Amino acid sequence: MMQIGRSRVFTSFDVAISMTPNPYASPKSDSTGLHASSKSHRLARRCLRLALLILLAPAVYNFICFSSPVAAGPDELRMQNASAWITWVNGFGFCLTAGAIWCLGLPLLELLTVVIHRIFGRAASVDAWKEALYQALSRAPLFSVLGAVLWTLWVAAIYQLGVGFYAVSVPIGVAAHLLAAGLYVPLFLRWYTLEHSKT
């Protein structure tokens, strides 16, 4: 009987110990939420890089047209040498910019989101703002296709058709700004909705 009583006491004690939370254990996180966030982050990064690849085509076209020599006379040899240096500098800057956007594009946008949230954010969390950013970037490839079309038309009109700079830059520039607004204005409205839905 004593052994049975002891076994019951020890069993109850063990159950109580097992049910007591460990104060030194690391806090558990919402793995589902973290998985969804990381998935959105990866999708946004892929979409941003895809948009960059799409825009590289008209960018290279513009670079080639801008860098091609206009005259080849001996009197303009010094101007040609200067143009060669300008071409190398522009090419280096072009590659550097493309590489920076490829590697640092999304982190810089996330940093900008954190800064804007710190200034204007009150109710919604910064993670909610970042999630809205990721959703906006998922539409970037479509907008980049339209932007590439506008960019190609601008280059062709100036360098191939000889249309005046301002005559083609004003309408295409307005269209390009409206196209970009279609990407960032819904993001700002989403941030505004997140803030006011919590109040």
Image (cartoon, rainbow, N blue to C red):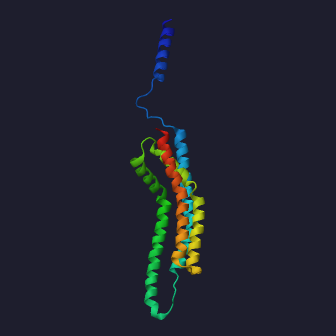
Is 182 in front, or is 118? 182
Question: How many tags in the picture?
Answer: 0
> In the image, is residue 27 above or below residue 175?
above
Q: Is residue 133 visible?
A: no
Q: Which of 101 and 191 is in front in this view?
A: 191
- What residue is shown at x 44% (from left), y 87% (from top)? 79
Q: In this view, does 112 lie to the left or right of 187?
A: left
User: x and y percent of residue 90 in the render?
Assistant: 46, 75
**Location of residue 157 in the rendering, given as x and y in whole percent from the top left corner:** 58, 77
Residue 92 at x, y percent in the picture: 46, 72
State the residue lying farthest toward the bottom: 74
Name the residue at the left extreme: 119
Residue 3 sits above or below residue 111 on the image: above
Residue at 60 percent across and 64 percent down: it is 146
For residue 67, above or below residue 106: below
Residue under the image location 45 percent in, 21 percent down: 17
Between 184 and 34, the one nearer to me in the picture: 184
Residue 103 appears in view: yes
Residue at 57 percent of width and 62 percent of height: 144
Q: Where is residue 114 in the image (x, y as percent from the top left)?
A: 42, 50
